[in-house]
Image (cartoon, rainbow, N blue to C red):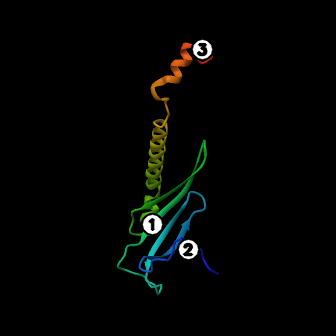
Amino acid sequence: MNMPSGLPDIKLDTTALYREEVFTDRQAGSVRRLTPVTVEGADDATRPVLYLGQTQLMTPGGVLPLGFEIEASSLQEALDKFPDAVKQALEQAIEEAQQMRREAASRIVVPEGGAAMGQAMSGSSGIKLP
């Protein structure tokens, strides 16, 4: 089948492969351990193992998924650091939401020169203000 031109050529980076394992208590969340591997599937000791946490929090607006990296050198350390990492991820999400709210508020469009408002106030537009 011939693919239309202009589409991206998506390839995996064979020098950045990881094996993924998921550990969960099926209640609070999960920790993903990403172990670097070679293209043959053998462990690659030249790169660090990564730990990623995931959880979901109920908010008045619905479910808030959180994903975050955990600086750890073992699964036990990642599990121990999970609660603090959740708090940091939540604080960051709140800060980002507040920043987005500030940016949205600063986008309020005001008519140029207030010409339309001046006409409305003088009564020339036919609009009567109480």
**Image spot of residue 37 (x, y percent):** 44, 80
x 62%, y 80%: residue: 2
User: What residue type is disc 1 on?
Assistant: Tyr
User: What residue type is disc 2 on?
Assistant: Ser
**Image spot of residue 21 (x, y percent):** 52, 73
Q: Which structural element holds mark 3?
A: loop
Q: In the rendered view, would you say 9 is above or below 121?
A: below
Question: Which tag is nearer the camera, tag 2 or tag 3?
Answer: 2
Q: Which residue is mark 2?
A: 5
Q: Disc 2 versus disc 3: distance between alpha carbons? A: 59 Å
**Image spot of residue 96 (x, y percent):** 46, 46
Q: Which residue is mark 1?
A: 51
Q: Which residue is mark 3?
A: 129
- In depth, the one of 4 and 37 nearer the eye is 4
The residue furthest front is: 124
Q: Earlier in the sequence, mark 1 or mark 3?
A: 1
Quadrant containing the N terminus is bottom right
User: What residue type is disc 3 on?
Assistant: Leu
Q: Disc 1 versus disc 3: distance between alpha carbons? A: 62 Å
Q: Quadrant of residue 26?
A: bottom right
C-beta proximity under 8 Å, tags 1 and 3: no
Q: Earlier in the sequence, mark 2 or mark 3?
A: 2
Quadrant containing the C terminus is top right
**Image spot of residue 57 (x, y percent):** 57, 50
Q: In the rendered view, would you say 46 is above or below 114?
A: below
Q: Which structural element holds mark 1?
A: strand
Q: Residues within 10 Å of mark 3 (few under 14, many from 20)?
A: few
C-beta proximity under 8 Å, tags 1 and 2: no
Q: Earlier in the sequence, mark 1 or mark 2?
A: 2
Q: Which structural element holds mark 2?
A: loop
- In depth, the one of 115 and 53 nearer the eye is 115
